[in-house]
Image (tube, grey):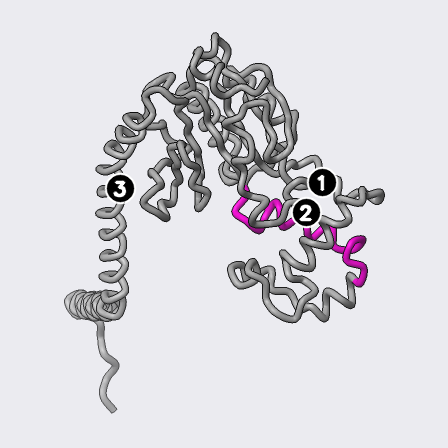
Amino acid sequence: MSPPRKWTESSLSRATADRASVRRVVRGIARRWELAGSVVRFARGAPLLWKATRIENGKDREMRGTLASRGEQIDAYFARCPDTPRKLQIGAGHNLLSGWLNTDIEVQSSGVVFLDAQQPFPFEDQAFDYVFSEHVIEHMPYKGGLFMVRECFRVLKPGGTVRIGTPDAQRVSSLLSEVKSEAGRQYIRWSASDHLGLYGDGRSALQLRRPEWDIDPVHIRRCFPNVTEDCACFVVNSLFRAYGHQFLYDFKTLSALLIEAGFSGLSRCAPGESAHTDLVEIDSHGTRIGTDANLFETMVVEGTKPGPRSARTAVDTVRT
């Protein structure tokens, strides 16, 4: 039987060194393995990254082209109306109004000029006689809406008018009341059945675009059998959540916003109506959701920038 091994100081030092060497080797292998994994992951994701980069570069080029041509489009508009009221529409979409500078953050046709309403408007002070915005301000936070209204005030001439159409939060909220108006009951029926598609067997346009609203109609019919009485909460939530809305206004809140920006002489009117000829029947939201639904849902407020209205605008555009 061999005698027990005696650990000398030198042998202990060699053993410690060997263990340290092994740890360095293991760490080196781990680092190389991690690096190899990163390379593999990068190789797998490279095509998607390249595709995304090309898309973003394409968007950047498109935006540069859009901004480059915007100045020319604006100059051309002003050149076309030297002696007529100058009118700005924010958020035109497909509602291209004749005689207006139609703008939108999404340019869907050649007749629309790019404008982000939450950024400084590319116009000089007192450039327009009228500014119109329909179902736009609710798609931005309150801070963004305040900025937009201040810019509207800046670019309007003294005596110029702003017209803003937006969902009425107070009327929308009234749908939750136990006592509903007949107009409210009809709005709930239309919204739940036709617009949201909660009771139909097929999918509505909203459900195709927003899958979270594609709710089993069997469940809806079982739990909420009375459309006008049981589905108000769905309708109210849809107006706050389903369309990209970020802040809904009641008349008091929108009025305070306009007054803070400097507007006065505020008035509330129905869609399509106005004391100014140039602002009559320019709204288009009713063509998309129906006249009755639009009359219930939409609040229209007009305000005036203090100061003498230009003679041209006063004579040509104010109804007697």
Residue 146 showing in the rendered view: yes
Residue at image location 78% in from the left, 54% down from the top: 228
Q: Name the residue under label 2.
A: 236
Vertical arrangement, residue 30 with respect to residue 318, above or below = below
Q: Residue 173 carries which label?
A: 1
Label 3 residue SS:
helix
The rendered magenta stretch, by its main secondary structure, is classed as: helix
Which numbered disc, 2 or 1, marks the residue that appears first in the sequence? 1
Q: In the image, which residues are magenta?
A: 225-245
**In the image: residue 124, left or right of residue 211:** left
The disc labelled 3 sits on which kind of residue? Answer: Thr
- Quarter of the image with the C terminus in it: top right
Which numbered disc, 3 or 2, marks the residue that appears first in the sequence? 3
**Does the magenta segment cover residue 228?**
yes
**In the image: residue 196, left or right of residue 31:** right
Q: Which corner quadrant of the image does residue 303 belong to? A: top right
